[in-house]
Structure formats: C-alpha cells, structure tokens
C-alpha cells in the first residue's frame, strides 16, 4: 500500500481544495482520495456504471464508479443513495460498495425585504444556499370578502348521508349552496300484529320483523284443563214435548206475572205495524226518531234520505219484496198489499234478502262484469283502487263442483286485502309489507249449485260478509282496520259459470270528493278523516294511499269519473310525495278537468316537514284564487318543518293524534262552514 500512500500525497499536493489551480475542488479531491483508499494493487477501473449496467463475467479484481441513485441489479443488488459517489468493487468473490463521497445540501431564507441575494458555501460535504431579502414589499389592500345568498337543500332519499357544496359569484358576494342527500332514515315499524295459539304448555313469544311489520306470536298460554267438578242436582225437571201454553204457564208462575197477557199485547203492537195500502193511499213510514224511512205514494213505495233518488217499485196486492238501505239493512217490506217495518237494528242482512232468485241491488255507482265461464283464472275490475270507505263487492256464479274462491282488492300488494273462501272456512288476509292472516272463521256450509258472496261496509270499523248457497246462508262481521287499496279481483281454483262480479261505493254519489295520500286515512286516529268522523262528519268520498303521488291520485280520479258520476266539489290535498314540478304538472291537469266538468276545485296547503319542503307548492295554492284548507297553518308548520309541540309524529312526516285533530278542525273552518 506504500505506492498508494504516495499517490494520495501527490493528490493532496496538486489537487487543491481551493485557490485558482487548474485542478481544484473539494469534491474532486475527496473522490480521488477515496479511490486511493478503496483500491489496492491489481484492481482495474472499468469505468462508470448505472443501475441498468451489466458488467458481465468478471475475470479478476475490478471497480466501477457509480453516482446515479438506484438499485444496481447486476452488482449483487447494491444500492446507491441520492447524492453519493461510490466505487462498486469486485474482489473476485463478491461485489461491495465503497462510498467515495456523499453530497448533502441545505437552504435558508430570511424574512427581510430588499434586493434579493444568495450565498453559497460548501463545508465538509454540505452545500449550503443562504437566500436573503426574498420577501416582496407589501401589496395594496384587497377587496373585502363577503357572502351573497346561502342556501341549503335536503332530498327525501334513504342511503349514506352526504353533502356537496357549490359556490358562485364574486368573492365580495359569494353564493354558497349546501346540498344534503340521504338524510332520511329507513321506515320503522308501521304495524304490530299479535297472534295466540290454542296450545297448552310453557308460554313463549316469538318476535319477528318483516318489512315494517312487527309480529308477536304467543304460544302455550292456554292453561291445562282443570279437574271435573262434582255433580249438581238441578231444582227442576226436564219435560219432553212441552207445548207453548205449558211454557207460558210455567214462566208466568216462575215470574209471578201473567205472561200470556204480555204476549198478547206484544202481538197487538206488531199487528199495528201493518198498514193497508191502495193506489190512493198517501202515507209516510217513520222510524223511532221520527225520520221518514219510506213513503207509499200513488201505488209506489219510495225510500227517502238514503241516497236513493231512483229507488222505487210498483206495488200490487201480489207484490213481495224488500227495500234495503246502503248498509244492507232491511228498511221496509211490501208483502201482500201491506207495508211492514222490519230489522231496524239488524246486525246481519235478513235471510229473505238473499234468495236464489233475488238479484243483489247496489244503490250507488258501480262496475259490473259478466262472464259466461271463469275457469282457474283471475278477473279484475277497473274500479277505483284507493277508495277508503263504504265499499261493497258482490260475486255470484254457478258450479257443478265447488272450488276455492279468492276475492278482494290488491292481492299480495301493499295495503291490499282479500278473502279466501274454501269448503270449510272464510279467511281474511291483508298486506302491510308482508301477507298476514287476520282471521279465519268456519262457515258450516255445504255448497251446492250456486254461490253468492257479498262483502259490504269495507273501510268502516267493521266489514259485513255473507255467503248464500242453495242449502244455507253464512253471515259474519269482521273487525276492520285495513287500508283497502288495490285493484278489485276474484279468482277461482275451479270453474264458475254465469258469473257476475260487481264493485260499488255509495260515496261515489256524494257531492264532495276528497283525494289525498297517507294523511287521508280512515280508521287510524292519527289521520284527520278519522277525527272528522268522530266529530260527526263523514258524508264524502275519501280516496287516499300511503305514498300516493299527485299523478297516482289523478289516475284514480279518472277511474271514478269513468263510472258516470262526478262531484260538485273536489278537495285536492296531494303534494307531500311530489317534487314541485311534478305536483304543478298534475295540479294543472286537475284544474282543466274541473273546469271542463263544472266541478268546484278546493285546494289545501301541505305542511312542510324536515325531509320535504312544500313552501313553493303552498305559495301556488295561496295565490291560485281557489278556496283552500290551510293545513300548514293548522299545525303551525314553518319553512324548516317545525310544527307545534306534540303535533308531528316521531317519523317526522305524519301528524300525531293531536295533529290530526287540528287538521280536522281546520277542515271544518276552512271548508265545511264555507261550503
């Protein structure tokens, strides 16, 4: 290594670190000294290398100079860092790296104002830049920033919440719009159904949630049968073949009264209810409240005050018929030249009204379809889908072998209901997100030759149902809390011939029609029509559907008008489920329809809720020139969707019971008292 020590001395002597010599510089001096230190005798400097260089097969000691940062794959993957100058040395066994020089740099800058300068120094491998006076002189004051209009919108969608911000205008009056999306939560539970089986055992309750329906299924609540009680000696004797006179005497003795005289007086009262009639008779029949029920006039029986302007029949001594009201109760009967008052408090329709040869009569606008044969198929009517009350359906047909019949509205559809009549029972189903069996009742009939089915009063608190076949009749009253929406249909699993299918609604002949969405419900105390009925007012047609749009309601309005009837006044309360433009389009269609049909249009404001802003619609309503019901005012709704305390339901869309009462009261003040 003595020769290399001498070489290093020569480099130090002739390649200076500073000065004006021809070969100068700290870097060059350092590199050459490093080469001397790194190499020994016998090494060949093969030149410079880059990360992509391939030295090939080495036959002896060799070295390359490398200064490009990267991985030198063909040099056993040696790494050269940024700023390094290195020798890649092969010692006939492996490659290794010797750093000849490592250059680092730094910079400083002051905060002064003046003529820009830079100083450069290099000490022990560190290159330093010193920037001075780089700060410019202060500029002129800019315009003051300001805000223009700040808006926020919220859509009615469900999903991952998000917000976007849009700006427009100059910085001095910047307009900012926040667009919030998907803030609406999923719909919660809308109905709760509970069932109890008839089993004995350990009590259990199974809870399931399907859609928005919560179902509680209780099992094992029935107690075990108790022990048989001891026998009792009854203080009377059973007598066979007891005559009416015997029974009268026995009861009289037991009651301490002369029962026979009471029976005689009762028979006399019944006889007094018969009135001889002829063509010259002119009399009224009144009920216990002195209301006129029917009038015999000029040889005709005419009913009054039952929405039956055309219900009259010729009468003769041989006539035998009933006149019934819109609920199926018998009002009066003309029988062999007599008028008889019957069944004023009847729970069911009298059996004599459904003889095989007596057609069912609907005193209302109706749709009827006749089919010669219906075999294992479904038949639908175009009857209005969303009427809420006073609906009646009838089906009659003949058969050689009875098969299951299904009949109702909206089969397996949301808010639909239907009855399944098989050989043993009648079952009522409904759908509020899933299909649920509400009640099943054994009818005890043996079907023969023909069947007549009538379902009436749909939409009230109850529903009357009866079946007539050749050998008997079944009548039953179902409790009713359902929405009654969907298309009228029936289907048979077998074959029916000479079939009539009829749908009717007595409300179609009312002068007032009300159309709406889920706010317009009948039976739910959180809906204003229900509260209005509690106040004694329900004499109007009610058409509504949860989630109903204006266009959907307009389609059902056209179905109603297609039955050949029209109202004097149309109350239009839609809008909660529409955009402003969609609502306005249908509103103009409704205007045109009312004008062309001489119908008085009454509008309604729609309360703004947190998820739906209805202020633009309400401005149109108030400026329309039409009478309107100010529902928004009734609940104190402001433009942010805040209502009076306790008026808005927790779903933040519908009213509470208190809110529904306020809406019903507003309907009375803004509409009933004016019209």
Image (spheres, grey):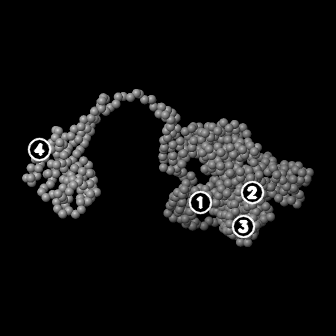
Q: Are marks 3 and 1 in contact (CB under 8 Å)?
A: no
Element marked by disc 4: helix
Spatial CA distance of label 4 from label 3 is 121 Å
Q: Nearer the viewer, residue 527 or 385?
A: 385
Q: Residues within 10 Å of mark 4 (few under 14, many from 20)?
A: few
Q: Which mark is residue 13?
A: 4
Q: Residues within 10 Å of mark 1 (few under 14, many from 20)?
A: some
Check residue 435 in the rendering and tell me which mark sits there, or answer none.
Answer: 1
The mark closer to the camera, 4 or 2, is 4
Circle nearer the N terminus (2, 3): 2
Q: Tell how many labels.
A: 4
Pick whichever of labels 4 and 1 is earlier in the sequence: 4
Q: Are marks 4 and 3 in contact (CB under 8 Å)?
A: no
Residue 129 visible in this rendered orientation of the protein: yes
Which quadrant of the structure image shows residue 362?
A: bottom right
The disc placed on residue 374 is: 3
Question: Mark 3 or mark 4, which is nearer the start of the sequence?
Answer: 4
Pair 2/1: label in front:
2
Which quarter of the picture shows residue 223?
bottom right
In space, the residues marked 4 and 2 are separated at their CA atoms by 121 Å
């Amino acid at each position: 290594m003595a020769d290399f020590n001498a070489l290093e001395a020569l480099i130090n002597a002739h390649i200076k670190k500073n000065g004006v010599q021809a070969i100068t510089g700290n870097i060059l001096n350092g590199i050459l000294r490093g080469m001397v230190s790194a190499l020994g005798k016998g090494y060949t400097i093969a030149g410079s290398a880059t990360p992509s260089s391939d030295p090939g097969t080495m036959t002896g000691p060799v070295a390359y100079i490398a200064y490009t940062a990267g991985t030198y794959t063909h040099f056993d993957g040696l790494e050269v860092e940024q700023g390094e100058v290195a020798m890649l040395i092969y010692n006939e066994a492996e490659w290794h790296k010797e750093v000849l020089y490592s250059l680092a740099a730094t910079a400083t800058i002051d905060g002064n104002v003046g003529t820009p300068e830079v100083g450069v120094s290099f000490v022990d491998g560190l290159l330093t830049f010193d920037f001075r006076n780089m700060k410019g002189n202060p500029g002129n004051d800019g315009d003051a920033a300001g805000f223009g209009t700040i808006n926020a919108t919220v859509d009615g969608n469900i999903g991952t919440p998000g917000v976007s911000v849009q700006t427009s205008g100059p910085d001095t009056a910047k307009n900012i719009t926040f667009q919030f999306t998907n803030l609406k939560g999923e719909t919660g539970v809308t109905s709760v159904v509970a069932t109890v089986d008839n089993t004995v055992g350990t009590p259990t309750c199974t809870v399931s949630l399907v859609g928005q329906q919560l179902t509680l299924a209780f099992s094992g609540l029935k107690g075990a049968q108790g022990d048989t009680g001891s026998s009792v000696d009854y203080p009377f004797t059973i007598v066979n073949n007891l005559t009416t006179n015997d029974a009268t005497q026995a009861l009289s003795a037991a009651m301490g009264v002369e029962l026979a005289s009471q029976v005689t007086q009762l028979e006399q009262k019944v006889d007094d209810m018969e009135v001889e009639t002829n063509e010259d008779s002119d009399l009224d029949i009144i009920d216990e409240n002195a209301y006129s029920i029917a009038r015999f006039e000029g040889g005709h029986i005419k009913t009054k005050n039952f929405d039956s302007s055309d219900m009259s029949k010729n009468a003769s001594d041989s006539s035998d018929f009933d006149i019934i009201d819109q609920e199926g109760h018998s009002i009066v009967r003309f029988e062999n030249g007599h008028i008889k008052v019957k069944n004023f408090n009847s729970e069911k329709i009298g059996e004599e009204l459904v003889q095989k040869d007596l057609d069912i009569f609907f005193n209302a606008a109706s749709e009827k379809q006749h089919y010669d044969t219906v075999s294992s198929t479904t038949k639908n009517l175009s009857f209005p889908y969303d009427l809420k009350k006073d609906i009646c359906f009838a089906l009659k047909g003949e058969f050689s072998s009875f098969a299951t019949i299904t009949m109702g509205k909206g089969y397996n559809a949301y808010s639909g209901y239907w009855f399944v009549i098989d050989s043993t029972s009648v079952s009522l189903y409904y759908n509020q997100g899933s299909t649920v069996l509400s009640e099943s009742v054994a009818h005890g009939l043996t079907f023969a030759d023909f069947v007549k089915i009538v379902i009436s009063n749909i939409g009230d608190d109850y529903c009357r149902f009866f079946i007539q076949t050749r050998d008997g009749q079944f009548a039953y009253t179902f409790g009713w809390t359902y929405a009654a929406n969907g298309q009228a249909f029936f289907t048979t699993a077998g074959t029916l011939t000479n079939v009539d299918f009829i749908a009717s609604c007595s409300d179609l002949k009312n002068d007032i029609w009300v159309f709406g969405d889920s706010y317009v419900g009948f039976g739910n105390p959180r809906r204003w029509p229900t509260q209005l009925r509690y106040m004694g007012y329900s004499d109007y047609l009610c058409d509504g559907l949860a989630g109903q749009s204006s266009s959907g309601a307009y389609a059902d309005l056209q179905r109603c008008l297609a039955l050949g009837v029209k109202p004097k006044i149309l109350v239009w309360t839609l809008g909660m489920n529409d955009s402003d433009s969609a609502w306005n389009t249908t509103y103009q269609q409704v205007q045109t329809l009312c004008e062309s049909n001489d119908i008085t249009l009454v509008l309604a404001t729609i309360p703004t809720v947190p998820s739906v802003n209805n202020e633009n619609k309400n401005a149109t309503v108030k400026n329309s020139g039409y009478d309107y019901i100010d529902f928004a005012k009734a609940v104190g709704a402001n433009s942010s969707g805040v209502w009076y305390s306790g008026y808005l339901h927790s779903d933040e869309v519908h009213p509470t019971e208190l809110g529904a009462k306020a809406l019903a009261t507003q309907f009375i003040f803004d509409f009933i008292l004016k019209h």
